[in-house]
Image (spheres, helix red, strand yellow):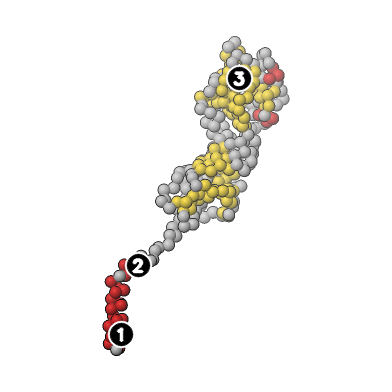
């Protein structure tokens, strides 16, 4: 009887060995490898909003992205939202406040990358569209614009930043001695000029006005602004505008540098 039991046990062991490949199928590796941090983060600096976009991650198990912000480069980063795609809009951004952004990628197993290492910040600012001013010789009280109060004013108002002139068929944008202007050339829309220039301001305190061109202003109270002319007639000029609320801040649209964050950062959900 003992001999039969030994034979049966031996046969069972042999069967297990022969079919070990079947039992191996019940085991699998746990994925603990996070995606790589997202790269090439960019922002569009808007009016009470910031649009972010970046390069798509290539991992096949990628599930989405988390977006973080901080009020300083070396501060703690807080989660503000998630996205299934390589883009996100921060609708809670406030004009005149500076925000630093970072993005992580995560997979379907919950593995999350480190923060993106691009230094990305944005200072949203107000903007407006289809504003009209008129030739100051014929309509002096409606010929100037004051960015600080978002309003059409007289060409000689204490708040005026520039005014429009039709001089014998040539159209001009004029500023006073305490303000600067520069023609940035043809653009597709108001978003095409990212920063105010550091030099190149008009020595004559004026610039020929052309449809489709963008002009940057350094105002008398040390703010930067820009307009893009959409149409001109003999009597009026129509333009879009953007105005930076932070004194001395040249960012008018986007900010992106190649400086890298340290490998370890404070972040919080």
Q: Which residue is mark 1?
A: 5
Picture quadrant where residue 244 is located: top right
Residue plotted at (61% across, 32% down): 127
- Residue behind mark 3: 237
Residue farthest to the top? 168
Tag 1 secondary structure: helix
**In the rendered image of this protein, does residue 8 appear above or below residue 21?**
below
Coordinates of residue 225 in the picture (x, y in percent):
61, 30
**Is tag 3's residue or tag 1's residue first in the polypeptide sequence?**
1
Tag 3's secondary structure? strand
Residue drawn at x 63%, y 22% is 132
Question: Where is residue 237 drawn, in percent x and y?
Answer: 60, 20
Q: Is residue 122 visible?
A: no
Q: Is residue 253 visible?
A: yes
Q: Nearer the viewer, residue 119 or 46?
A: 46
Quarter location, residue 221: top right
In the rendered image of this protein, does residue 208 appear above or below residue 67?
A: above
Q: Quadrant of the N terminus?
A: bottom left
Q: Quadrant of residue 133?
A: top right
The x and y percentages for residue 240 are 59, 27
| Residue 24, numbered circle | 2
In the rendered image, residue 230, in percent from the top left (x then y), is placed at 56, 23
Disc 2: CA contacts within 10 A as few (<14), some (14-19) or many (>=20): few
- The quarter in which the C terminus is drawn is bottom right
Tag 2 secondary structure? helix
Nearest to N terminus: mark 2 or mark 3: 2
């Amino acid at each position: 009887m003992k001999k039969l039991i030994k034979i049966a046990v031996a046969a069972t062991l042999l069967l297990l060995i022969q079919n070990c490949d079947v039992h191996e199928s019940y085991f699998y590796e746990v994925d603990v490898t996070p995606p790589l941090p997202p790269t090439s983060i960019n922002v569009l600096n808007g009016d009470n909003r910031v649009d972010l976009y970046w390069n798509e991650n290539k991992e096949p198990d990628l599930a989405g992205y988390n977006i973080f912000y901080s009020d300083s480069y070396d501060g703690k980063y807080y989660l503000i939202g998630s996205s299934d795609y390589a883009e996100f809009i921060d609708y809670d951004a406030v004009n005149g406040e500076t925000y630093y952004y970072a993005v992580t990628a995560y997979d379907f197993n919950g593995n999350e990358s480190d923060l993106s290492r691009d230094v990305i910040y944005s200072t949203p600012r107000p903007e407006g569209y289809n504003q009209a001013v008129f030739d100051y010789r014929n309509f002096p009280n409606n010929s100037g614009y004051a960015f600080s109060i978002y309003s059409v004013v007289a060409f000689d108002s204490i708040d005026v930043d520039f005014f429009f002139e039709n001089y014998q068929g040539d159209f001009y944008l004029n500023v006073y001695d305490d303000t600067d202007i520069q023609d940035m050339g043809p653009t597709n829309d108001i978003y095409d000029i990212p920063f105010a220039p550091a030099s190149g301001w008009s020595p004559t305190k004026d610039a020929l006005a052309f449809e489709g061109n963008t002009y940057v202003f350094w105002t008398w109270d040390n703010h930067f602004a820009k307009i893009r002319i959409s149409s001109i007639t003999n009597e009026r000029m129509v333009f879009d505008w953007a105005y930076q609320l932070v004194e001395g801040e040249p960012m008018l649209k986007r900010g992106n540098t190649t400086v890298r964050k340290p490998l370890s950062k404070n972040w919080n959900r």
